[in-house]
Image: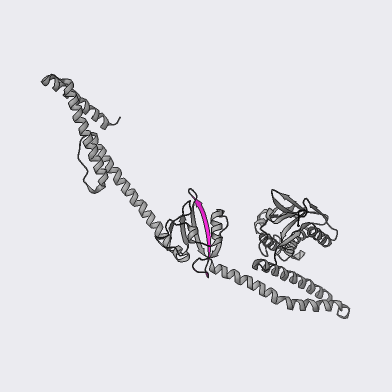
Amino acid sequence: MTPVWRRELRRILYLLILAVGCGYYYFGKPLEALCLMMGIYISWQWLQLYRLHRWLDQGQTTVLPRTLGIWGSIFTENQRLQQSSIKHQQRLQAIINRIQDSTAALQDSVLMVDATGALEFWNQAAQNYLGLRSPVDIGQPITNLIRTPEFKAYFDKADYREPLTIRSPINPRIYLQFNITLFGRKDRLILVHDVTRLKQLEEMRKDFVANVSHELRTPLTVISGYVETMQAASEMLPPRWGRMLQQMSEQSHRMENLLKDLLMLSRLETGENEQAQPVALQPLLEAIRRDAASLSSNKHTLSLSIDHDQKLMGFYNELRSAFSNLVFNAVKYTPEGGHVKLHWYSEGGKGYFSVTDNGIGIAHHHIPRLTERFYRADPSRSIATGGTGLGLAIVKHVLLHHDGELQISSEEGKGSTFTCVFPGSRLSDTSAPGQ
């Protein structure tokens, strides 16, 4: 028990003893005197309680009431707590003001959205990029203010591992990238970047690659034609010319393959293709296995297994290119006498095409970058096999075009497995009616 309470109890005890003594000595009625003293004490307590309520209701606008006993400690402690709370609120307000000033100075948009999707806060850049108005839009659902269908689908899906890039709702010439982070009780922090410059550079790169590839095809075809003509008449040329013509022929064919891959990537990126059609997988995979056997020249063992005879909704040429790249790579990077296995199967409502070999394998740190353009885990070996460095990039883009993904597992010296995964929505059985 604190000293304040001890003093208050002693004070009450002294008052009771005084009331009983005076009532007995002066009036001969100690009980009545005791009741009178208790009534006075209770009234005084109610008066102090009223003063405390009025002082708290008025806040710091009135002087702290003066009183005795435990009520004096209560008034003093309440004043101390109020002053501490005010200082704490001032510190918090200073922090909030600093955060608001810093976010207002950002060139990127910052928005806070609650669990229901209602806007709580945004900075000046958000008003410039998204056309938000303060305070009219506070509390409004963000999907009512940004009406782009892609954004609504992205926001409602709540899968924010990849950012979303769309045009600005108030300026179609500006491209914005949305990065959303969940925090608290499903509240959202939205960062919006202006990626117009990057988008323009990407379009310039695509146009450059497509235009250069087209422009180089004609002169390269002319050069290859003349080289072949000279090789056909090699007996009329000096002997030393044979090796030079052979190297020219090899490099021109390599350049033709490179241009072909670049044009394929350009078509995939720009979406220049025909309407998707059901592609029968069994004849496609059998044709690829025969091509791989021809490339291998019977130096490898190739096997094909198809668990389910299905069709895949997509684009025949793209699928053939992607599957061929995986199979031909397995043949090229598997030593003579090795085994390459092609396997199509369904599992968990998805379709899988895997290519497994027991070749040289790939170091683990190379795997995340294998689908980058011109990336080679072993440049010297790729040059020796005539690779362009674009094969797996084409595979990745083809799978993205078919709503699929590429999975890679490998171990140095033990081989690799490349698996194409397709969603069940693109699969159908060949035995189904109308297929």
Q: Which residues are magenta?
A: 170-184
Q: Quadrant of residue 404?
A: bottom right
Foreground of the two, 51 or 224: 51
Q: Quadrant of residue 19?
A: top left
Q: How is the image coloured?
A: one colour
- Which quadrant would the C terminus be assigned to in this image? bottom right
> Residue at coordinates 34% horizontally, 50% vertically from top-left?
89
Q: Is residue 378 magenta?
A: no
Residue 427 located left or right of residue 298: left
Whether residue 334 is visible: no
- Which quadrant would the N terminus be assigned to in this image? top left
Coordinates of residue 125 in the picture (x, y in percent): 45, 64
Q: Residue furthest bottom?
A: 236
Q: Is residue 177 magenta?
A: yes
Answer above or below: position of 228 versus 402: below
Taken as a whole, is the magenta stretch helix, strand or loop?
Answer: strand
Foreground of the two, 303 or 254: 303
Coordinates of residue 2 in the picture (x, y in percent): 29, 31
Q: Residue furthest front?
A: 433
Whether residue 308 is visible: yes
Coordinates of residue 290 in the picture (x, y in percent): 83, 60
Q: Residue furthest right?
A: 235
> Residue at coordinates 11% horizontally, 21% vertically from top-left?
26
Answer above or below: position of 53 versus 166: above
Foreground of the two, 132 or 180: 132
Coordinates of residue 376 in the picture (x, y in percent): 69, 62
How many numbered circles are shown?
0
